[in-house]
Image (spheres, rainbow, N blue to C red):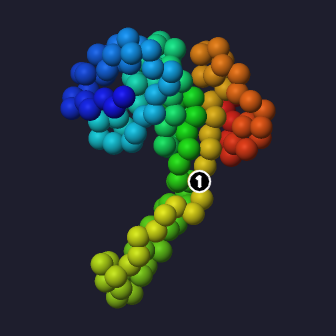
Amino acid sequence: MALGMRRSDQLENAFTQVVEQQVDAVIVGEGHMTGPHRKHIAELATRSRLPTTCGRRKWTATRCLMSYGPHPVDMYRRAADYVDRILKGAKPSDLPIEQPEKLELVINLRTAKALGLTIPRPLLHRADKVIE
């Protein structure tokens, strides 16, 4: 079930719909609609007792249950490499599109506890960071 919201004042209604549809979990995408409201989204998800998966570490620090996405420092280093190539004369249109090389799994155990969830040990061992 995708929620195509256009305004931030639709967040409350979106979570009401999700609960009414008996959705088990929510995947929150990063964008202009969600990024500035991540704390509010995390509060709504916790109040609705919905586990959330997000794409960035900063979301997990804001009570998202877990995040899995590109490692931020690695992405900045790679961006610097692109800038370096362009400053040395490479045409941006000639540079390849690359996938992230390092992905990061972060789990927030405080959120898991608030939701009454137990995270399996093998998953905790695979996590790059566990927030306790």
Residue 9 location (% of width, % of height): 24, 21
Residue occupying the far left of the picture: 6
Residue visible at 39% across and 15% down in the picture: 21
Q: Split into 4 quadrants, where in the image is the N terminus?
A: top left
Q: Does 126 appear above or below 40?
A: below
Q: From the viewer's perspective, is 131 left or right of 66? A: right
Residue occupying the far bottom of the picture: 89
Q: Does 86 appear above or below 128?
A: below
Judging from the image, what secondary structure is the residue with disc 1 in? strand
Q: Amino acid at mark 1?
A: Leu
Q: From the viewer's perspective, is 24 left or right of 131? A: left
Residue 60 location (% of width, % of height): 55, 34
Quadrant in which residue 93 is drawn: bottom left
Q: From the viewer's perspective, is 80 left or right of 34? A: right
Q: Does 57 appear above or below 97?
A: above
Q: From the viewer's perspective, is 58 left or right of 119? A: left
Q: Does 47 appear above or below 3?
A: above
Q: How many marks?
A: 1
The reply to whether residue 79 is visible in this rendering is yes
Quadrant in which residue 43 is drawn: top left
Residue visible at 77% across and 37% down in the picture: 122
Residue visible at 41% across and 76% down in the picture: 96
Q: Split into 4 quadrants, where in the image is the C terminus?
A: top right
Residue 6 location (% of width, % of height): 21, 32
Residue visible at 72% across and 37% down in the picture: 123
Residue 111 location (% of width, % of height): 60, 22
Residue count near mark 1 (Cα–Cα under 10 Å), binned few <14, some 14–19, many ≥20: some
Label 1: which residue?
103
The reply to whether residue 43 is visible in this rendering is no
Toward the viewer: 126 or 38?
126
